[in-house]
Image (spheres, helix red, strand yellow):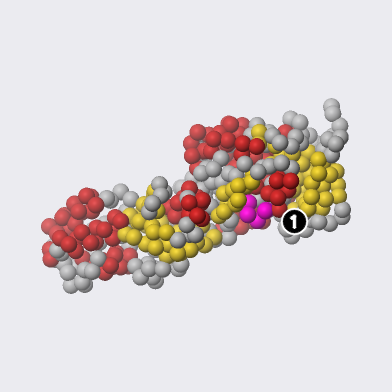
Amino acid sequence: MPEAPRVLIAGGGAAGFFAALACAEARPDADIHIYERGPEVLTKVRISGGGRCNVTHACFEPEELVKNYPRGARELLGPFHRFQPRDTVAWFEAHGVKLKTEEDGRMFPVTDNSQTIVDCLMGEAARLGIKVRTGCGLTEIRKKDDGGFRVWLTEDGNVDCDRLLLCTGGTRGLRGHGLAETLGHTVAPPVPSLFTFHVEDARLRGLAGISVPMARVRVGGTPLDEVGPLLITHWGLSGPCILRTSAWGARLLEERGYKFNLQLQWLADHDHKRVAAVFQEARMRFARKHVALWSPLGLPQRLWERLVAAADINADITWNTLSKPQALALARELCAGEYHVSAKSMNKEEFVTCGGVHLKEIDFRTMESRTCPGLHIAGEVLDLDAITGGFNFQAAWTTGWLAGRAMAGA
């Protein structure tokens, strides 16, 4: 067997830890070191899913799984045939962590506590002899003439290694992008890809916490058109429908300075024609009911009242006295209301970006650089990202696992 490799991993997140574990499992004698610039490792794992850790998603067909990746879908298809959510579930269960599936497909530890995942990963790292150091990052990397790398650290000078993995994350890992560039890679500038929309509008004011199960949103002048649950917040709009729009439109919306008009259809399965039919039935069956006090569409009452007022329908109007212009105005509010987005916010404490090392420069069978042999790149430092729901973590587990196995020579 060849001499045991010395492996250095830059970044103590999900991809870095999973790569280290995969490498150690495949090559127990490997000398593996994780260097994390921040004060603690697995930060995003700790805060994901409101502190529960959305480990992955119950989507077990690679061809369906890749549809959740605005960037990286084509490149991840092959890797997902080798390590996908089913493998993630099996790995964690084999290491003492059982996962559960929620109605929307998201998967969490049965403990509903991200510390369960952190303890599992750190416990395995300790058991396998992986050295983990925090508060110490990389400042420079040079390829050695005789193979391998010399790496300069923020603390304690430099070290040599045979194999090197960069997995320093997205925007918060800009130094990793810079290091990749010094080794011959090109980097697409990172921009946020999961964020909520700031909307200052009288129709929404004071309605924070109200949600609808299936809305449709479109961004004017773009192909962005998404359907899903929608949540009104203190600052505007959120929920899966908005987060999908932000993910698929990350570049387009950044170019617009996060200022654009949003067309909102409060009930995705009710277009103008269907709403008109519902109104006509209400005129006949509920003629004496006041329009503002009763919604035939099942919308939350306070939201319905705002939309009725926005259509300039007085409180004393009943269904049998509703005029045709008033009905059309209310249908417009329901099916094509215009809302101006003035800014964005991070999705809770989670932060996902698009941008990073160009995917064409990576061999996705091993996550090895095509421009710098011996260098591997995994996780969000690459120009790949997903919608919310555990898909970003799955990309981290998969790319980390492939890189770890490759660095072990497996």
Question: Picture quarter containing residue 230?
Answer: bottom left
Please give the name of the residue rendered at 26% of the width and 69% of the height, measured from the top-left corner.
309
Question: In the image, is residue 64 above or below residue 15?
Answer: above
Q: Is residue 304 visible?
A: yes
Residue situated in front as seen by the camera: 84 or 108:
84
Residue in the image at 33% along x and 50% along y: 268
- Residue at left 66%, top 33%? 363
Q: The residue under label 1 is which amino acid type?
A: Arg
Return the residue found at the far top: 1
Residue identified by numbered label 1: 37
Q: Which residues are magenta?
A: 170-174
Membership of 171 in magenta stretch: yes
* Drawn side of residue 209 relative to residue 315, left or right: right
Left-right relation of 250 to 229 = right
Residue visible at 19% across and 68% down? 290
The percent coordinates of residue 114 (x first, y second) are 62, 54
Residue 298 placement (x, y as % from top left): 29, 58
Secondary element at image label 1 = loop
Rate crowding at label 1 as few (under 14), some (14 to 19) or many (20 or more) other CA atoms within 10 Å: some
Q: How many callouts does the rendering have? A: 1
Q: Quadrant of the N terminus?
A: top right
- Main SS of residues in magenta: helix
Residue 231 horizontal/vertical position (percent): 42, 60
Instruction: Say whether residue 286 is visible.
Output: no
Quarter the C terminus occupies:
top right
Residue 267 part of the magenta-drawn span = no
The x, y position of residue 303, in whole percent, is 33, 65
Q: Report whether 316 appears left or right of 249.
A: left
